[in-house]
Amino acid sequence: MFSSIWQDIRAQFSHGSMLTRIILVNIGGFLLLLMAKLALGGIGDGSVYADFSRSLMVGADWKHNLTHPWVLVTHMFLHEGFWHLLWNMLGLYWFGRIVGDLLGDRRVLPIYLLSGLAGGLVFFIMANLVTGLGFGSFALGASAAFMGILVVAGITAPDYLIGLPLLGDVRLKFIVLFFLVLDLVGISNGDNTGGSFGHLGGAFMGYLIAQQLQNGNDWTAPVNRIWDSITSFFENIFSARKPKPRVVHRSPDLKKQTVGKQGRRSASSAPDDLSYQDQLDAILDKIKLTGYDSLSASEKEFLFNASNK
């Protein structure tokens, strides 16, 4: 059973949408901290677990962030509380799909990263400028990144209808307004003040990204170029370790030979006649262009079977 679950997760991560990958990484970050807490024991200051977990969180102390520069990225993929994780992932799923459908799957990750980065920086700045409002020393979670995606969705499609229990259909712009007011109330009450400032920082970054997109400036493009360079680097490393594919030379008259006197189709005339590798390559190309969700049921089944070979 566990082997099957792991294979399904691998298939979703390898061929699913970027939103699916982000959610899976967040779940992985939650399980990492959970396993570390069980293995290392103790959650108080000075415990081994506290030192480990805080090494992955953005802090209010500039020395901590300077000596742990990776925290600007890692903090937005970590959650210690189950409900914190659940609500963030549900929000990402609901509103991230709107962004992916309207603006393209490739823009989801850059918006997430830029908004999460802005949230971490705002938390750090405000923690050092404002005192007496209940700031914590460390911050983690995808809330700022979620707020950025929510605001981008709201600005792109403000009248998009969302069905909510008890309330019925609600326009997206009012949902965005509700979350913004919720953070302002949190700041005024001193409830998770640092987190609320971070959320607003992510929301402001989402606002800037959406406005620039409407003006013809795509802030997600540089992030995608950097991401493509990183993935290409690792793909080249791993592909160098794999055996080179065997080259097969075919006769140029092969297609003609496959057509019989009774008018049978040639090997290139229909998808059913494609070789196994050709079908797999075609499906992977389709995923890159339009995402995993665009596949038909038969294509998903073919891809799943291929991942088990």
Image (cartoon, rainbow, N blue to C red):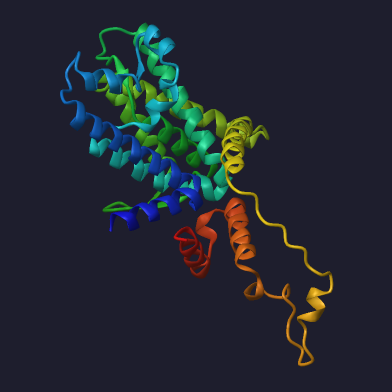
x then y, percent, for residue 226: 60, 30
Q: Nearer the viewer, residue 154 or 250?
A: 250
What residue appears at the point 49 percent right and 31 percent down from the top-left corner? 113
Of all residues shown, which one is farthest toward the right? 253
Q: Position of residue 194 (x, y in %)?
A: 32, 19
Give the vertical position of 262 relative to 301 (above or below).
below
Measured along the vertical axis of the image, is residue 12 above or below residue 213? below
The answer to whether residue 151 shows anywhere in this view is: yes
Q: Does residue 164 appear left or right of residue 215 in this picture?
A: left
Quadrant in which the N terminus appears: bottom left
The answer to whether residue 80 shows anywhere in this view is no
Q: Position of residue 33 (x, y in %)?
A: 27, 31
Q: Is residue 89 above or below residue 247?
A: above
Which residue is painted at 46% across and 33% down in the image? 148
Determine whether, in the image, residue 85 is placed left or right of residue 203. Answer: left
Q: How many marks?
A: 0
On the picture, is 309 further left or further right than 212?
A: left
Residue at x-position 30% and y-position 19%: 54
Q: Nearer the viewer, residue 308 or 65?
A: 308
Q: Position of residue 188 (x, y in %)?
A: 28, 19
Q: Is residue 109 left or right of residue 253?
A: left
Tell me the quarter of the picture where residue 7 sits.
Answer: bottom left
> Which of the 4 image quarters holds residue 268?
bottom right
In this rendered view, identify the residue nearer to me: 259 or 220.
259
